[in-house]
Amino acid sequence: MSRRGQKVAFDQRSMASYVRSRRGKSRGRASSRVSAYTPSDGGSYYDDESRYGDAESRYDGGGGGYDDDDDGYQDSYYAGAYDDEPEGALGYVPPDFEIAEAHAEESNPQHALITKPFNMKPLDLKRYGVGVVLYFTYLRTLSFCFLVLAMLSAPSVYLNTLGANYAVKDDPLIAVVEQSSLGNLYPLYDWEMGGAASLVATDALGGETAVPATAPPTGNAPPSPVEWFNQTTEGFVGEWQHGPATQVLFFGFATGKDTLLVGLSYVNLFMLFVFTAFAFVIGPVQDKIIAEVDENLTTIEDYSVAVRDMPKDVTDAQELWKFFDKRIGKVQDVQLAYNTSELLGLALEREKLASAYDSALGRYKKASDDPDVSDNTLHKKKQLALEKKGEVHSVDAAIRAIQNDRMGDPRVSIAAYVTFQDEESFLRCLTEFRPGLFAWIFRPKKLRMREKYRLVVKQAPPPSDIKWQNLQFGWGERQFRQFNVTMLTVVVLAIAFIGIAGVTTLENETETEYDGPACRNDCAYTVAPLTLGNVLLRDIYKNCWELDLASGGNASAPLSAGAASTRTLLQEAATDGSDTTNATTTTYGNLPGDGTHEQQDKVAEYDGACGPYDAFCFACYCLEHIDAVSIYRESSYCHPYVAGFTLQVIARGASQGIILVLNIVLAPLMVVLVKYERHHSNSGEQRSLMVKLFLAQFFNSSIILLVIAGSFPGLKRAMVGTFAEGLLFQGEITDTNSKWYTEVGVSVSVAIITLPLTARFGTAVRFVAFRWKRWLAVTTAVTQDELNAAFEGYDFDISTRYGEVLNVLFVTMVFSGGMPSLIPFAAVSFMMNYVIDKFDFARCSKLPPWYSNDLAEASANLVAYSAVGHLLFAVWANSFYRIEPDKLVSSIIGDVLYGLCDAWQANAPAPLNDLFGTVSDMREVARRALQKNTAWYTMILSVLSFALICRTIARVSRTVLAELFPGTFARGLRKPEGNPPFELAVQGEQLVGPNTYSIKDDPQYAAAFRKIVWENDHGDLTRLSGKHRGGGTSSRYGRSGGV
């Protein structure tokens, strides 16, 4: 049950009570108080003496209840108020629509206040907290930044399309990714040969390892001299040589691809400079926004401090009140927090169960008033209500067990929240109790509580940001819980990795390798577009393939009578009575079934016997269609290959499906796991959720794909003899070659496109569902809680949105070094996020908690590391094309880089010393990093890494120095803002948000202050027994009793 009073009948008195209670909570009282609380109605509470954080409320009491004396709930049945109500009020009365509307105005105030959601600016949302402002500012900045980057990446996308390595695919996404990637520029030279290469050798155990070898000739290389032969594992033989660079036409000018690659690297570096500037500027921009929002808003945090390390036996707020009032200044309010985590948790759990019981009870009562409902249906509804009631009683029993000290620890003070009457006293408190180790050690006695206890005093967080039920969990226990959650997350990702690896292995097993250049050289089909128009040649190729298959791979073997007859018919059709040996007499046809002249020549050459390439050409043609994802256009002709391709599609779809589903499931899973970590604040919990969700999605969307597709001989060798042999690390892609962009690049693109689109589509679903549930609940809700819940918006979870944005940001920046088309995709994604999330916030969501700036700061701190990933991948992708070294950069960092590589290979443990078997000599890594098209990437990577390391060291050092010398090194010290006295701020409605740290005024914990009445359970709903079918007698019904 929620904090709105659940009442069987809502009369004028209860409505007025409800409105009074809500108004009192929104404005609050400005009076200064720490008064004792005495129940006004004789009700009983969780224990006889204790308060939980509010001088006017009791959390526990000897008889068993939560309540306060002025929350407006004494009029409801929580206190047994039905004892003097008329019998007619005991029947079913539907929930009140006006109360639900009032609840919606409180839960979703932005729905009415924001009239034009698409036109609002981030600072227009400052009344909803700095966390919301910073989120939308972050999205807007990213949108603008990537819009600029998209324009800067246009030259790279265009220049990559000048290559002609890939055939145009039917699938538009595959076509865009391939044509705009660096893989489209292959080959770089007319021919290459020599230089270092990794030759994979098989050892005695069946494992594979890389050994030194010389790269074989490629392209139209000249005849190799003697030293190119007889390669051994004893060293490299022969230097790298290459022919002229292949040419591309760039605005009418012929340019070598090697020169083009170097130019592309400079374009990419300029784009990276713009992004890096954004990454380092976003932090100061956020600080400016935080200062602006804080200056323009007056909140209770501007007057309040959080106090820890006080005596554990402080149970009277008056003691703290007098301490600060005497030493600092006038105190407005003091709220204490105790180690009542179990009670709070049980109270919140009881609220959910009681709400479910009320719903079941309401349905039973509504059915009991309907003469058309059968006895069997009514009995089922009654039994369900009794089951729900039993669950409530089980929680009641646990609560009473804690009350009776049969479980739980003795209550101790954990923290306090002190609110001063004016800003001057608040600032004086922060000055006197300044942070820092030395200040804490040498705290004067007059500032020590009881002249003994050194208090730790900091500015208080927003009241709604406090997780009261977690305050008793210390730092050590929370770290242990975080470690457990991290390990469980790793297990989930490992299971996903094994699943994706399994379907990828299945996909690879259905693939058939073929030599594309040889196919096109020996076969007569056309490539652009991929067609085989000559009907007779189609039959020749297919029948020769079938004959080849029937004869075990030998088309010239003796044939069956049927096959021989087919071959004779083909010969007669092909020759058409003419002399096939005289090619000059061929008359070319122009009909659609005649095909090209080359195809007609092939038919004319056919003498009834399958040539050496005829069967081969049928396979080539169908495999080319599979590669172009156009096999279904030739499904009838290539039907032997359709089944295998379909299995590939299913396996590929399963792989993408696992990634997509896991990315979607990760959000709710992480929400549940992070709650277990027991953070002290909502912001801390959301920050942990954001980081874990981002890292999990990034690993699932990209790193898994890299590892599965890549060839890692060292890891593959380690799997020999285990259950994972033949399943894990079976990839065959050894470098960022053309195949890498087709298999990995396309999958990465799909991952970063589908997840944001799914989330944005979810907003449309949320909007329709929100309208639908409101309309439906008007007639179907049986309790006020149900109707209130239907009028509430959905949660606007900023942390999961930050995680999604960071995932898209990192995947884009890391892989755009070889696939610049990802940047426009990301720009569209961020703009969609910004626009649609504004609409979601203004029309579909309820008001989020008042988040601090933790999430924004954590997100901003991570941005710069995506530039490091971009540079690393850019070096790897560009160095696949070998170019001469850059002399300038080599002279600056060459010796250092080669020395580091030598030291790594000599000292790093296996299999890290050879990067899991991917290289035979680490010096090859240094050589690739110093090419003309990668050297400046390497240089900037070194500088950026050094800057980030220095920034980290500086932050850690500043944190340490701030503890020792806070006056010099502490950041964010409060300065006077000219805030009015607290009472005037409240009365003049200048104070935004809550006006007290009382836990009972926090809507999240209203359930902890419900009054409950312990009753015996006789296994019946006696109050309902006299209305249906004329049986039983009527009796009164209480909230948690009445049976």
Image (tube, rainbow, N blue to C red):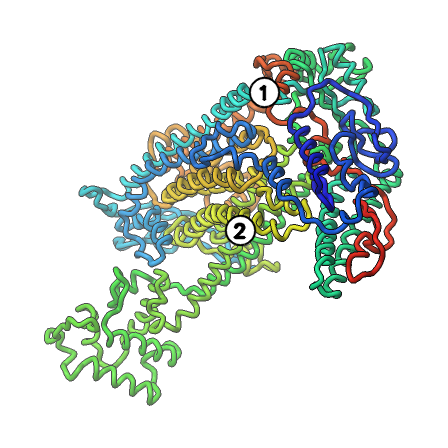
> Camera-side residue: 105 or 370?
370
On the image, numbered disc 2 is attached to which residue?
Answer: 714
Q: Tell me where residue 466 appears, x and y as whole percent.
A: 67, 31
Mark 1 vs mark 2, CA separation in Å: 66 Å
Horizontal placement of 879 versus 759: left or right? Answer: left
Q: Residue at x 61, y 35 (%)?
A: 106
Residue 712 visible in the displayed image: yes
The answer to which image quadrant residue 531 occupies is: bottom left
Q: Quadrant of residue 796?
A: top right
| Residue 679 in view (yes/no) | no
Q: Which residue is mark 1?
A: 990
Q: Give whichever of 482, 268 is nearer the camera.
A: 482
Residue at position x 89%, y 39% from top?
Answer: 404
Q: Is residue 334 left or right of residue 409?
A: left
For the residue pair 807 and 937, the one nearer the viewer reads as 807
**Residue 737, placed above or below residue 965:** below
Mark 1 is on which residue type? Answer: Gln
Q: Is residue 624 above or below residue 738?
A: below
- Identity of the residue drawn at 15% across and 73% down: 589
Q: What residue is drawn where x is 59% and y is 24%?
A: 992
- Amino acid at pointer 2: Gly
Picture coordinates of residue 985, whole percent (x, y): 62, 18
Query: Badge 2: how crowded within 10 Å, few (<14), some, or many (20+)?
Result: many
- Mark 1 or mark 2: which comes first in sequence? 2
